[in-house]
Amino acid sequence: MKVGIIGTGYVGLPTGVGLAELGNQVTCIDREPSKINALKAGKITLYEDGLEDLFHKNVREGRLHFTTSMEEGVKDADLVIIAVGTPPHPVTKEADMKYIHAAATELAEYLTGYTVVATKSTVPVGTGDVVEGLIHKKNPSADFDVVSLPEFLREGFAVHDFFHPDRIVVGANTEKAKNVIKELYKPFEGKTNMLFVKRRSSETIKYASNAFLAIKIHYINEMANFCEKTGADINEVAKGMGLDSRIGPRFLNPGPGYGGSCFPKDTMAMSFMARQNGVEMTLINAAIEGNLQRKKQMAARILTAVEGIENPKIAVLGLAFKDGTDDCRESPAMEIVGELINRGANITAYDPKAMETAKLLVGDKINYAEDMYSTLKDADVLAILTEWGEFKSLDLNKAADLMRHKKIVDCRNLIDAEKAQQLGFNYQGIGR
């Protein structure tokens, strides 16, 4: 199948590489010449575990192409996937649809033969109708259908999730469009759940799923606060909860709040859509507000740990919003760092993958270390903000020798609390 993908970000590029690996001819389209030039030169523009090897393989075997030309990517395509950003509007916090609308309008004139246009970006309910209208207006004779094809790729695990999906949701209003998508995902036939629903239902499923997971994270963080006051251990509580098959263990890890490119913007967009339709979303609104406060609470804990210390140095491990990615968008770690910067803190930070991304956001307002032990030199407190696996193996004896004061604020519960305390650390985890 010939596939055009508009957008080469954290959704578009892994999707393009994955579809090429399945044997399709894929052309990725992006308006930024610097991105396309880098990709053509063999330089991958984002980090995802396992993506680079598949990228080079499919370029080498001639199934994966890159262009800034909409015509080149769309002409004669069987399927065109829109995977551009839908960032929150700066004022209303609704999903900003200008990139979706621009893509739909531009691609319309290059459609040849029957084409399925799929929105893979997370879009408000009814977007399929809007995209359909924009294409009809620009090219009244075009033969096409618009489907909703929401993505459920976890950042950091996008390659794994592409090839091992727990479900494939398709919002299609015609049998002809359904058959094209069935052919596209034929390699997964019998291996996963493929759900065909109305287009508006599909658009809602993505928002409903992300909002529910955000609420689950907010809930376990509130329970962690309760455990801290009562002497219970949130890790034991979460384990006991997760054994209930109705609840499950995932997204019950307490921490500094949810972040990334999806949960913050999708909860805000869901809240906006609810208000538009006269529906009260109390749980989602509580999660949004609670998550904002969560980051401030974590920053306050770190600052409390260095109260009374003259010109304290704060060591930060983790800047990405989660492990396995270099993405710092809406990262709890970066927001906590921002709070600390506003209080005049002296920060030295390290992240295995997100250093360059972080530099684009905060520049020289913080110091950057080459590894996690360089971060600790003469530090007065260590703050662990992202759950990278390598941080779990931190040598506490070495840390004790390097630090000026032995204090740890572990916002991810990665460190062995008992061992840290035995070595004389003032250790503070979450929900313990």
Image (tube, rainbow, N blue to C red):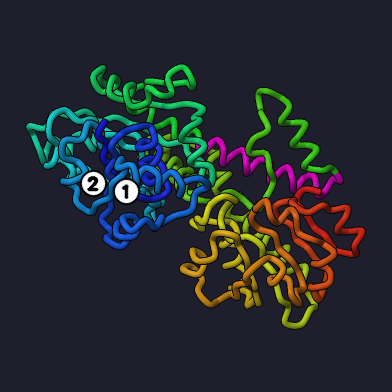
Marks 1 and 2 sit apart, C-alpha to C-alpha, by 9 Å
Q: With respect to residue 100, does 277 lie above or below?
A: above
**Residue 82 in sight:** no
Q: Quadrant of residue 146?
A: top left
Left or right of 183 in this view: 153: right
Q: What residue appears at the point 8 percent right and 34 percent down from the top-left corner?
A: 140
Q: Is residue 102 visible?
A: yes
Q: Quadrant of residue 240?
A: top right
Q: Is residue 156 above or below residue 45?
A: above
Is 370 in front, or is 416? 370
Task: Tell which of 137 and 181 is nearer to you.
Answer: 181
The residue lying at 38 percent from left, 28 percent from top is 202
- Tell me which secondary structure the magenta stretch mostly adopts: helix
Residue at image mark 2? 103
- Mark on residue 7? 1
Q: Which residues are magenta?
A: 210-231
Residue furthest front as drawn: 61
Measured as percent of width and height from the top left, residue 307 is found at 78, 74
Q: Sequence order check: which comes first, mark 1 or mark 2? A: 1
Element at label 2:
helix
Which amino acid type is marked by label 2? Ala
